[in-house]
Image: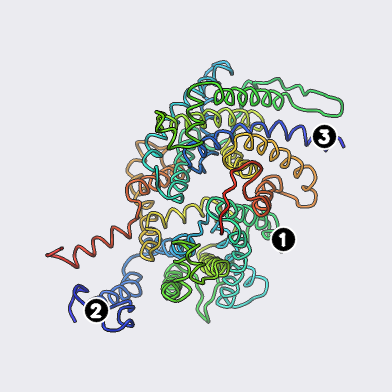
Amino acid sequence: MQLFLLAIVTGIMVGSIYALVALGWCLIYKCSGVLNLAMGELTLIGAYVCLTFYTWGVPFILALVFTMVIGIILGFLTEHFFLRKLIGEPILTVIMVTVGLSFFFRGVVELIWGTDTRVFLPPVFPMKPIVWGPVIIGQVYLWSFIAAIILLIAFVSFFKYTRWGLSMQACADDEMAALSLGVSAKFVYAMAWAIAFMAAGVGGTLLGNINGLNISVGYLGLLVLPAVVLGGLNSVPGAIVGGIIIGILQNLSGAYLDQYFPGGVKEIAPFAFMVIVLLFLPYGLWGWERIERV
Amino acid sequence: MSWLPCGIYHEYYKQDHRWWQTRFVWGKMILLFIVVYYLFPQYAGLYWIGVANIIGYTVLGAMGVQLLIGYCGQITLGHAAFIAVGAYVCALGMLMFHLPYIVSLLIAAFAAGIWSVLFGLPSAKVKGFYLIMTTMAAQFITVDFILTQYVSRIGGRGVAFSLPPGTIKVGPLVIDNDVRVYYLMVVLVTLCTLAMANLLRSRVGRAWIAIRDNDIAAEALGVNIVKYKLLAFFVAGVLGGVAGAFWISNLAALSPEHFMWSWSLWLVGVILIGGVGSIHGIFFGSMFMVLVLEALKFAIVPLAPIFPQLQMKFLFLKEAAFGLAICLFLIYEPNGMAYRWWQIKNYFNLWPFSY
């Protein structure tokens, strides 16, 4: 029972980070129709930028803000130099450009920061675990959870209440109508990439705080794919719920299945789960159902 | 019979479908065969033969990807899994059951085909992005889980199968040096290319192309979509299995690290750079990718004394360059090198009156 509770609680907390990254992914897909396979590398870049600021002695919160600013700049640049030229190209081309970007970003990250595992020193969050009845949990998880939730709320209210957010929603809903009403599609695409970079950067930083930071954080960023598939590709609430469910599932399979299939069950379970979801629920929880003969 | 294929009019379909339609093309192809089978291994030197082996492996691997993506329209990002299955089945067949290499290779190709069909099954229900996801899952489940955690441990071998020299024999001939590997590679590449090219102009190939262009129309024309999609996965898996079974002849030890996800992506990058939907494209793409890396290596040697870190970080530089190359090719040359080749050829065919 304790194991179960622990897995659930840890799962929710890690899952909220996945939800944050998945939100960024979903945004790009909704606004511009690009299926982004470079999300893992976006988390990597953000995490390393934040680490660099932190090791320079910038306070953590400020470092996080700087990371987000740099994320916005990188997002604008990426969109301008690579994605804007691909509007209207076939799906494989766009996907492969994001794959190319992922190789490029990973190569650059490894060139600059190397492949050794780095940790945030001194530790950002206190090491003392928190005890809630039977559940014992590290403070890192709790603070990550809180940070992820705050950001999620911030992003969602950005979409709901600001002019830019509303123009993005309009563009995602019906691009032609939005264009005719004076929404700049280019700006919306750039904004979507900027927000994705921001969200991924914060997500990567939080993940890096939990286990230390190396290239495998990029692999964790890849876990957003099962999350968004589960939630339905173009649903923001779906991405959030999907992220949390994938987090829980991952921890549960780590806790229970590991003794039967030793080794990498924890990493594989989300993908195996994804295949099953695709077979029975191809549009996820809240995705738009396009009925199509295959 | 003229020298150039310009201005030839066919009277029968048979003539129209021939690969090599004029004496000139025949001469060109015979010259190519002489170069590939005799002159190159004779005069190129061991280093370049080693490079050619890598190119050949890339060609064999990319062939299945080209078939799936370029001819059947089923995007796959997990082809390294099937190559890995081929390599492992072949190695197991030789090490544990002491089968001859050729028999083992055939079994490996068949096993990889079946494995590929297994992961192609979702293609009956999903397409596009969702299919990409399932092929990615195939990669992670096969290589990172089954091969790494279970198959690698068969026989207490730890994480890697060692392949002692002299394991791989074709008849009495031991494949133990680069020149022999080269000949094995050339024969396999020739056979696979012939098989694929002829398959593509048969009924099966036309059905695949119909599915790629418009699956609903293809079904209306009486193509059994599920059957042909699965057949495409099977053939692609077989080609991948051949690639894997070939590659172990070039290795001293077989470990899952040779078949990571990045290798799948690399193969897709190869066909995109070479040209989707073209057999030439496989060769152009493979040569381009491998030779660019060689060029990078040579470029780094004189720079090494100035930036000593560069040599250490070559691997990362390679990754970044590869990613950038894919992006730039897709943005500025979306039809790939095969299209450019076709244009150049046409220019000379119509020269000097190109109207």
Does any portion of residue B335 appear in the rendered image?
A: yes
Q: Which of the 4 image quadrants contains residue A25?
A: top right
Q: Position of residue B105 (x, y in %)?
A: 56, 73
Question: Front-most of B293 and A129?
Answer: A129
Instruction: Tell me, for residue A5, which label it has, or none.
Output: 3
Question: Front-most of B25 and B144?
Answer: B25
* Protein chain holding label 2: B
Nearer to us: label 1 or label 2: 2
Residue at point 62%, 47% (across, down): A283
Residue labelled with disc 2? B22
* Protein chain holding label 3: A
Q: Which amino acid, mark 3?
A: Leu
Question: Front-most of B237 and B232?
Answer: B232
Q: Which type of secondary structure does the marked residue at label 1 adopt?
A: helix
Query: Which quadrant of the rendered structure holds the N terminus of chain B?
Result: bottom left
Query: Which quadrant of the rendered structure holds the C terminus of chain B?
Result: bottom left
Q: Position of residue B16 (x, y in %)?
A: 30, 78
Q: Residues within 10 Å of mark 2 (few under 14, many from 20)?
A: some
Up/down of B104 relative to A14, above or below = below
Asked whether the beta carbons under mark 1 and mark 2 sit within 8 Å of each other, the answer is no
Q: Which of the 4 image quadrants contains residue B248?
A: bottom right
Residue labelled with disc 1? B156
Residue at point 43%, 44% (across, down): B314
Q: Which type of secondary structure does the marked residue at label 3 adopt?
A: helix
Does any portion of residue B245 appear in the rendered image?
A: no
- The answer for how far apart the CA atoms under marks 1 and 2 are is 58 Å
Q: Residues within 10 Å of mark 1 (few under 14, many from 20)?
A: few
